[in-house]
DNA sequence: TCTGGGGTCCTAGGACCC
DNA sequence: TCTGGGGTCCTAGGACCC
């Protein structure tokens, strides 16, 4: 069977997908160490304390939307005594790994889809009661990590996503829903509004509504041709998944990443070239370290700057600098990034945000040394130097060794993080020992 | 130099995800 | 909504080729 040149295999009738979704993930992580905040309103802020990235149910009920800038809802949050946390992302990463370990022990195939969601494929378990299995798994995850999850089970990934949402919203499901029969599937689709379908975003949803499509059930009725015209190839695939055909498979072995980005909103607007240079060099160095950690090289470095909103031209400008040959060397990448900075910097503007993106990544093993490189020893020395730098920085859990252009004084552009919780699990200095001792002597 | 059909590769921008 | 940050995929259009 063919569709727009993509060859599709349709032999997956027996597939059973489960989606495990951590509830209010960042909030739940914070609550593990603050049990006093159970049933209290809690929200977690983005890197710059700029906007809301996680809300407890209590905060959702206040009508505070996801992603809203903090200043717009500060009054509501204060009026209802909402506890705020600056995002403590290393902590959440640690919890995430613990949850994944449990899933890997429970299911034969696991795709880690994001920090708080995983898809499982469990048909080979040959279970008679998927709902019971999911409830037990849920119980286990909560006991071992303190994180509450919702689990949806169905015959496609898109339906499993919907089922997990259903389980999250309806208490009588006890956190797990299996869309088993044709009637279950229909109930699920009629319940799910079109904007909550996986793959339908804020742009497409209003368009569909205008054309009389309000629920996933409505969308499941449209023809391929109509879906193609309105939503493109991904839309066709989504519609077919809603009907129960498998189009999205489990991606178990992580494909290598195709780009690496390090970008930040600055603490204040920046006009000074020297300051910008420091920020861009730091981004470049961080991205390079990440690149090396996955044994990859980059062939091109993109940098971008976004002017403050008060300027007429406040859209980002960007430029891509190609390297002479693939590299993961911090010095080479910083040099390219600063060349890019020079090319787009405008002294009449001040900038709110900027970043470095390594595009066009290659596996380090697969890349051959350029024919024009006359001095392979020099390359080897450089790469040995990089290995030492990474080893030192890893050992001290910090970026102790840096390039001169990174400018040690980062205060100029550093993020605000005023409400950060302790690094409970990732820093010896902040382990909650005192609390533990107190508990044990009670 | 223009017309024309047909193809590839690259890039920028859009849409989506969490 | 644009005061987060980090990703992926698709598509239209331009450059270039025969």
Image (cartoon, coloured by chain):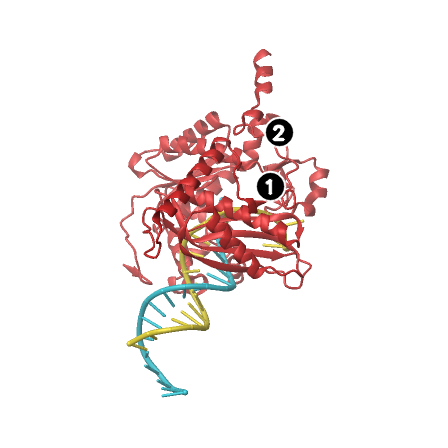
Chain colours: A red, B cyan, C yellow
Residue A364 in the image, given as x and y percentages of width and height: 35, 47
Q: Is residue A146 above or below residue A285?
A: above
> Is residue A326 or residue C12 the one in the foreground?
A326
Q: Chain of mark 2?
A: A
Element assignment for label 1: loop
Q: Which residue is mark 1?
A: A408
Q: Residue at x 58, y 26 (%)?
A: A430
Q: Nearer the viewer, residue A151 or A441?
A: A441
Asked whether the viewer can see residue A156, the reply is: no
Q: Residue at x 32, y 33 (%)?
A: A128
Q: Residue at x 66, y 64 (%)?
A: A312
Residue located beneath label 2 in the image: A37
Q: Find out whether the residues at labels 1 and 2 contact each other: C-beta distance under 8 Å.
A: no
Q: Do marks 1 and 2 share a subunit?
A: yes
Between disc 1 and disc 2, whose residue precedes? 2
Rendering quarter of residue A410: top right
**Pointer 2 local density, CA inside 10 Å: few below 14, some 14–19, many at least 20:** some
- The secondary structure type at the circle numbered 2 is helix
CA separation in Å, label 1 and label 2? 38 Å
Please say if A21 is above or below A237.
above
Quarter of the image with the C terminus of chain A in it: top right
Q: Residue A182 at x, y = what percent?
A: 37, 46
In the rendered image, the quadrant that contains the N terminus of chain A is bottom left
Residue appearing at x 58%, y 38% in the figure:
A87
């Amino acid at each position: 069977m063919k569709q727009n040149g993509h060859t599709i295999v349709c032999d997956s009738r027996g597939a059973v997908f489960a989606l495990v979704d951590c509830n209010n993930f960042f909030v739940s992580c914070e609550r593990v160490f603050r049990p006093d905040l159970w049933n209290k309103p809690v929200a977690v802020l983005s890197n710059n304390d700029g906007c809301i990235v996680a809300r407890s149910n209590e905060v959702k009920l206040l009508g505070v939307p996801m992603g809203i800038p903090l200043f717009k809802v500060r009054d509501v949050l204060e009026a209802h005594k909402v506890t705020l946390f600056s995002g403590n992302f290393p902590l959440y990463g640690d919890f995430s790994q613990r949850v994944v370990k449990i899933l890997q022990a429970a299911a034969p195939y696991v795709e880690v889809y994001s920090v708080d969601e995983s898809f499982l494929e469990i048909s080979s378990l040959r279970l008679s009661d998927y709902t019971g299995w999911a409830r037990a798994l849920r119980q286990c995850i909560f006991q071992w990590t303190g994180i509450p999850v919702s689990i949806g089970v169905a015959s496609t990934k898109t339906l499993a996503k919907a089922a997990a949402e259903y389980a999250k919203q309806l208490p009588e499901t006890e956190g797990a829903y299996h869309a088993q029969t044709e009637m279950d599937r229909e109930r699920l689709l009629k319940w799910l509004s079109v904007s909550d379908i996986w793959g339908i975003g804020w742009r497409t949803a209003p368009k569909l509504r205008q054309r009389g499509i309000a629920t996933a059930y409505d969308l499941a009725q449209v023809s391929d041709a109509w879906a193609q015209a309105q939503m493109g190839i991904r839309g066709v695939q989504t519609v077919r998944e809603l009907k129960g055909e498998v189009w999205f498979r489990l991606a178990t072995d992580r494909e290598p990443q195709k780009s690496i980005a390090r970008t930040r909103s600055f603490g204040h607007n920046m006009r000074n070239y020297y300051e910008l240079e420091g920020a861009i060099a730091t981004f470049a160095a961080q991205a390079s370290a990440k690149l090396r950690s996955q044994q990859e090289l980059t062939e091109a470095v993109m940098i971008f700057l976004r002017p403050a909103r008060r300027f007429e031209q406040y859209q980002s400008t960007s430029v891509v600098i190609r390297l002479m040959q693939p590299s993961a060397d911090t010095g080479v990448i910083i040099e390219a990034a600063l060349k890019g900075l020079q090319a787009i910097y405008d002294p009449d503007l001040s900038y709110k945000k900027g970043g470095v993106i390594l595009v066009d990544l290659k596996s380090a093993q697969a890349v051959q040394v350029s024919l024009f490189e006359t001095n392979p020893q020099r390359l080897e020395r450089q790469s040995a130097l990089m290995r030492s730098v990474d080893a030192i920085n890893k050992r001290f859990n910090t970026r102790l060794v840096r390039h001169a252009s990174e400018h040690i004084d980062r205060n100029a552009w550093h993020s605000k993080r005023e409400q950060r919780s302790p690094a409970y699990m990732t820093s010896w200095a902040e382990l909650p020992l005192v609390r533990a001792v107190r508990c044990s002597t009670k």
